[in-house]
Amino acid sequence: MTERLSTGVKGLDSMIEGGIPKGFFVALTGEPGTGKTILCLHFTDEGLKSGDGCIYVTTEESRESILNQADQFGLRLREELGKRLILIDALMGEGEWSLRHLELDELIEKVVEAKKVLGYGRARLVIDSMSAFWLDRPAMARRYSYYVKKVLSKWDLTILATSQYAISTSEAFGWGVEHIADGIIRFRRRVVNGMLKRFVIVEKMRQTNHDLFMHEIEIRPNQGLRVLGPIGLRREDERQFRR
Ligand SMILES: Nc1ncnc2c1ncn2[C@@H]1O[C@H](COP(=O)(O)OP(=O)(O)OP(=O)(O)O)[C@@H](O)[C@H]1O
Ligand SMILES: [Mg+2]
């Protein structure tokens, strides 16, 4: 039977037969503010709880910003920092666990170094975001993702990598990650009756009989991300997403 890693969000786990298959490279895509980073925090917290080593690479926010956000949801990243959690700051970090340049080779080198420090055994890796590595070379997205997946596949890592969507077109920024990834969890947002609503759909999960519905999610203080339930069963829901 496939070994699966819980995402830390029960409602999402039940959409993917209990969790992400071990060793997968899963892309989290979606517009700004839709919950990608917050899911990464849950995934990390869950890993720490179950004794996995965790490596978290942040390119969009500082180390402190990530820790503060985790604190707000009662996720225990801060107390595991430097123990079972290594947080690599690629934005403005200094010191050992930071990247000087947003270069893939440097990223891979640091991740491998971190994995060696954590030791043998199952580990989780978050790269938030992968898009940062092809900022000025969007056409390289596929090749870069392939490279990361191939090189890191030897290290017993299960990987979540976020990828941003262009706001104007809702097209993935950089193309091709979706084909390389073993899974795609897609976040979306809509203003419905004057209110911002957020949704998640599993667009792909290899080796998994995954849920096919779009689900509404909510993000709450102290709780974080929660899946509320499927939409699309009602006509007005369906109309919102038809283009
Ligand atoms: N303490 C909190 N309580 C309730 N909601 C919160 C709290 N903190 C953050 N949020 C919500 O979460 C959103 C941020 O979600 P998240 O950081 O996961 O977005 P993202 O998909 O990673 O976006 P980006 O692509 O810009 O990085 C905020 O805009 C806010 O709506
Ligand atoms: Mg984010």
Image: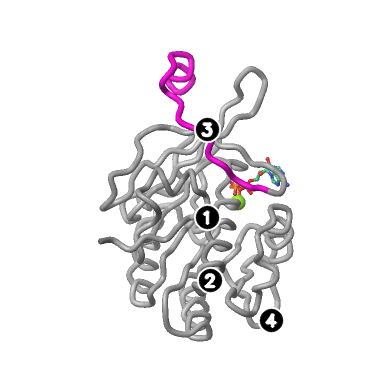
Where is residue 168 drawn, in percent x and y? Answer: 54, 33
Q: Give the range drawn in magenta.
A: 223-243
Please report the residue visible at 64 percent of the width from the left and 41 percent of the height from the top: 219
The answer to whether marks 1 and 2 mark residues whose Cβ atoms lie closer than 8 Å is: no
Mark 1: secondary structure: loop
Label 1 to label 3, Cα distance in Å?
A: 17 Å
Can residue 57 be found in the magenta stretch?
Answer: no
Considering the image in quadrants, where does the N terminus appear? bottom left
* Among numbered discs 1 and 3, the one appearing first in the sequence: 1
Please report the residue visible at 36 percent of the width from the left and 51 percent of the height from the top: 183
Label 3 to label 4, Cα distance in Å?
A: 40 Å
Mark 4 lies within 8 Å of ligand 2 (Cβ measured): no
Looking at the picture, which amino acid does disc 3 mark? Glu
Mark 3: secondary structure: strand
Foreground mark, 4 or 2? 2
Looking at the picture, which amino acid does disc 1 mark? Gly
Please report the residue visible at 43 percent of the width from the left and 49 percent of the height from the top: 13
The answer to whether marks 3 and 4 mark residues whose Cβ atoms lie closer than 8 Å is: no
The answer to whether marks 4 and 2 mark residues whose Cβ atoms lie closer than 8 Å is: no
Residue of label 2? 54
* Among numbered discs 1 and 4, the one appearing first in the sequence: 1
Mark 4: secondary structure: loop
* Among numbered discs 2 and 3, the one appearing first in the sequence: 2
Q: Quadrant of ligand 1?
A: top right
Residue of label 1? 8
* Above or below, comparing residue 7 to residue 193 in the picture: below
- For residue 41, say whether it is visible: yes
Q: Any mark on residue 216, and which?
A: 3
Residue of label 4? 95
Image quadrant assignment for residue 94? bottom right
Q: How crowded is mark 2: few (under 14 residues within 10 Å), some or many (20 or more)?
A: many
Label 1 to label 4, Cα distance in Å?
A: 30 Å
